[in-house]
Image (cartoon, grey):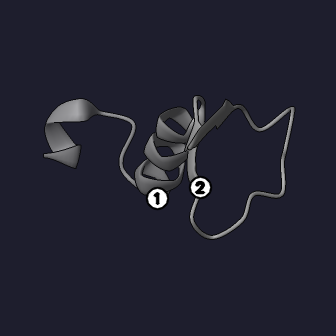
Amino acid sequence: TWVITDRNHPVQAPAHVRLIILDEQERLETKLSEGLPANQQQAI
């Protein structure tokens, strides 16, 4: 069983359910980019 949602509609799913959060990638990219230089060449 899969549950597909986003951060605006949190759900409590049992451990055996696959939870797909549609906006998780955006949140992770933002978190990983914290502290990096604004200049993309410097960030590489």
Residue depicted at x 84% and y 48%? 11
Q: Quadrant of residue 10?
A: top right
Residue depicted at x 59% and y 55%? 17
Residue identified by numbered label 2: 17
Q: CA distance from mark 1 to mark 2?
A: 34 Å
Q: Which mark is residue 35?
A: 1
Looking at the image, do the residues carrying marks 1 and 2 touch, with CB atoms under 8 Å apart?
no
Q: Position of residue 25 (x, y in %)?
A: 47, 37
Instruction: Name the outermost residue toward the front.
Output: 1
Indicate left or right for 42 with 30 as reference: left
The N terminus: image quadrant: top right
**Total label count?**
2
Q: Amino acid at mark 2?
A: Val
Q: Position of residue 31 (x, y in %)?
A: 53, 53
Name above or below for residue 27 compared with residue 32. above
Residue depicted at x 86% and y 32%? 8
Label 2: state its secondary structure.
Answer: loop
| Depth order, front residue of 6/34 | 6
Indicate left or right for 36 with 8 as reference: left
Residue depicted at x 60% and y 31%? 23
User: Within 10 angstroms of label 2, few (less than 14), some, or many (20 or more) residues?
Assistant: few
Looking at the image, tell me whether mark 1 or mark 2 is earlier in sequence order: 2
Q: Position of residue 14 (x, y in %)?
A: 72, 65
| Depth order, front residue of 18/34 | 18
Q: Amino acid at mark 1?
A: Gly
Name above or below for residue 20 compared with residue 28. above
| Depth order, front residue of 1/31 | 1
Q: Position of residue 40 (x, y in %)?
A: 24, 32
User: Within 10 angstroms of label 1, few (less than 14), some, or many (20 or more) residues?
Assistant: few
